[in-house]
Amino acid sequence: MEVLALALVIFTFSITIFGFRRWSDRDTKLPPGSFGWPVVGETIQFLFGKPEKFVGDRMKKYSPDIFKTKILGEKTAVICGPNGHKFLFSNEQKYFAAFRPHPMQYIFRSYQTKAPAAKPPEVPRDETKVLRQPGFLKPEALIRFLGKMDSMTQLQLQTHWEGKDVVKAYPLAKTITLALACRFFMGTDNPDRIARLVQHFDDITVGMHSIMLNIPGTIFHRANKAAAAIRTELMSVIKEKKDAMESGVKMQDILSHMIVITDSSGKFMPEAEIADKVMGLLVAGYSTVATTITFLMKYVGLNPDVYEMIRAEQMEIASSKKAGELLEWEDMQKMRYSWNVICETMRLVPPLQGTFRQVLTEFTYAGYTVPKGWKVYWTVSTTNMDPKYFRDPQKFDPSRYENGEAHAPYTYVPFGGGPRTCPGKEYARLAILAFIHNLVKYYKWEVMDPLEKVNGDMMPTPEKGLPIRLHRI
Ligand code: HEM
């Protein structure tokens, strides 16, 4: 009896020890790092500290490859450096699927349940399928739109800046960008409508990465109010489109395409879903391009030698064209130096810090295991300012992309990489180049406050809107 009792004790003890060893083995394999405070985790530090400081401090403290944290309500592994980018971009759908943080899901999915903690589906719906599939952002479609991009940019510059001495760069960058996006995605260029929309978009962009506190005065509340206002505007666009289509007018924009497509069961997309999807596209294509144009004006304004080189390149193209002739695809391929300047601007002020993924299957990276269901975050900030990859990283120096000084693979990824690479990359390139072309053709400018404070970390914004003094050439 005693022997049996002793055997039972030894067995129970062994199971406990074995179980504990297995548990602790598993635990030591999790990435190093901290989940921070209960409930909020490290969300405050993530949202309100400088993004490169958030990742830089933790890479130093825990590991340069991967660390764990808890942000926006999710256990998250931050995967770092060029090898991390490569691993992430190469394993899409094997280990990772797209994941939008909860505030973003809430703001953009009015047509679904609003339960904030609604569990994401095992394999999330691909919100961008419609953009990638029918060829809307493919070169053929962009070539057709390029002339319009050029003429709309000219018109906006004339309307808002002609004859003025001191102007603000940021508001015009936003109006031009939104006007182009409204035209491209919705086939509308009603200036009153664009003016009504522009005031709401910043609130949404900031609210996408915010604490989900839906009470008056909070960032999240403002974002939801802005989204409701935009939705109302979009619903009236949808109605106009439907009426026009019924009377036989042919439409070529993305919104009209969403109205006519059906799912596998033959059902049309509900209007509320169309409105949310179009709003998502407008947001994706709006603040990124507007931010790049604005900081490009800042850096070029502060570097007269760079201005002169851009102008020489653009004037050579301009002088090869007849009066009134619009930009063409071949012209854009000649704008190599101007593109380098855009790249350098995006390195110093990334228009988008990074994005999240959902872990589909447990995986191991750099010796650490990340469980299924966790989220993964990648960010340009783990490489952009690292002197290992970019000499004198604080310096604005577009020449670093010339003379064979190519950056190492996966160190410069402003548009992401792999299957989820930004589908708007080419559109953005053309929109910003068309803007530069028209700007330097007619203007020189001085930045009035070179030390102007930059607010916002997820969406950098010059505090006073970047006032500049214009000189008509
Ligand atoms: C300078 C401008 C832009 C930059 C730097 C930029 C950057 C990015 C980055 C880093 C991503 C995330 C990629 C990933 O998760 O791996 C992304 C995704 C996306 N971008 Fe852009 N973007 C820009 C402009 C645009 C424009 C103009 C559009 C629309 C016309 C657009 C539409 C999108 C969409 C729909 C996604 C989500 C793709 C997906 O999840 O599959 N972007 N962008």
Image (cartoon, grey):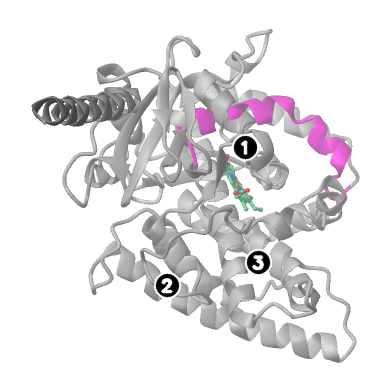
Horizontally, residue 188 falls left or right of residue 456, namely: right
Instruction: Write down the region rendered in magenta.
Output: 323-351
Query: How far apart in space, not on screen, are marks 3 and 1 (Cα)?
Result: 35 Å
The amino acid sitting under disc 3 is: Cys
As helix, strand or loop, the secondary structure at mark 3 comes to helix
Residue 370 numbered mark, or none: none
Question: Which image quadrant: the C terminus?
Answer: top right
> Where residue 238 appears, x then y in whole percent?
68, 82
- Give the residue number, with chain letter if any, for mark 2: 226
> Where residue 428 appears, x then y in whole percent?
66, 45
Question: Which image quadrant: the N terminus?
Answer: top left
The amino acid sitting under disc 2 is: Ala
> Where residue 273 appears, x then y in whole percent?
60, 75
Residue 94 numbered mark, or none: 1
- Give the residue number, with chain letter if any, for mark 3: 182
Residue 333 in the magenta stretch? The answer is yes
